[in-house]
Amino acid sequence: MPAYVYRVTKYDPADSDEHGHCTGAEDTRSDHGEVEASYLQAVAAFAAETGVDHLVIREPQVSSFVHFGLEPVVDGFGLKGLFPPARHGSSEPVVPPGFHDGAQVPLNTGLELVRAMLRDNGAWCRLEVEDVFTVHVGWDQYLYIGSSRNCEAALAQTSALGLFPERLASSPYDISWEVEGTDPPRAADDAFWDGLRRAVATGRIGVLEETHVEGAARWHRLTCDTIDTVRAGLAPRARLAAWPPLSSDIDSVLASFPTDGLVEGVWQDKDGRIRSVFCDETAFPELSSLISAASAASLKSGYAGEDLPLYTAVMPDSDGVVRARWQTDPTADDQDH
């Protein structure tokens, strides 16, 4: 995190309680107008004074089963027009392949991503230049900006726009506390793929889950003939999870539905595409209908720590170093390698 961190909001600190929570009448939604524009001008001012004209996307997310934003998710999560569209045949939800960890975008695109986050459109990420600049949006229109400079001119401009910048020791969304003390994930290197190939050949593994954006996954059927093609088409820095083959015994899969709770259904359509969805008992009938028409499927618990994959890994950069800050739970197979 850069040395100078500011929380920028439309809320007057004079209207805050002893815990720093706003008690005034200010709306917690974006006005999609003058105030929103002021937020974006403030970000641009801090970036300009820091000397930043490009930003790097980190920890991208889209809304999936649960959406906590005050405004409804929009089609495309607010990413339409910012990146080239997803390739034809991608699994839902459709997320542009350019929206991934480590992607560098011009400042103007970064500002549009901030706009989408202010509007709760469904996409979220940190935007940063490592140790130099960072910007991200928290709850209720709270904007956090970090810079390697104190940015006195940007602070004055932000105040003139009617916003309230406050100096903080750190952002509550600082990534360092999330990864500190955790083991680095396994790299999806040649050794990983050699082990995966052996597991596919013996029938232990049959599908690969690719998560390049939290909340959205692409699924790939693995055979000895398709592994290399799948590997070549994966998104940069994607988190990978290898699972047993889907079952062609659809009746058994349907019979495995619990009476309630959270589950993840994974199924292969007749056209060969693999899809997945998280749902609770309120949507079990719809999921059952989708699985009934599938050629193969599986049903897994939607709760953390249950029904773990056999292998996990993260795609390294071209130099072999894993820079994505995904969290994975190493499996027994991972720890043996």
Image (tube, rainbow, N blue to C red):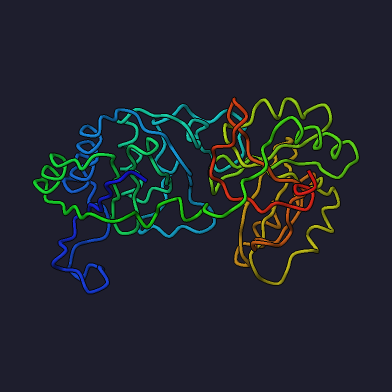
Residue sitting nearer the eye, 110 or 115: 110
Image location (x, y in percent) of residue 197: 82, 34
Q: Is residue 207 left or right of residue 136?
A: right
**Residue 16: % across, % down:** 19, 69
Residue at the bottom extreme of this rendering: 18
Q: Is residue 115 left or right of residue 73?
A: left
Quadrant where the C terminus sits is: top right
> Quick one: which residue is furthest to the right in this view?
202
* Residue 213 falls left or right of residue 192: left
Q: 305 or 6, which lies in front?
A: 6
Q: Indicate the quadrant where residue 278 lies.
A: bottom right
Residue projecting furthest to the left: 160
Q: Position of residue 4 (x, y in %)?
A: 27, 47
Q: Quadrant of residue 321?
A: top right
Residue at point 31%, 31% (across, down): 107
Viewer-side residue, 7 vs 293 = 7
Examine the rendered structure and indicate whether residue 290 appears above or below residue 88. below
Q: Is residue 250 left or right of residue 100?
A: right
Q: Identify the residue at horizontal 42%, vertical 50% (top origin).
A: 73
Picture coordinates of residue 171, whole percent (x, y): 34, 54
The residue at 19%/62% (across/down) is 26
Q: Residue at x 34, y 29 (%)?
A: 54
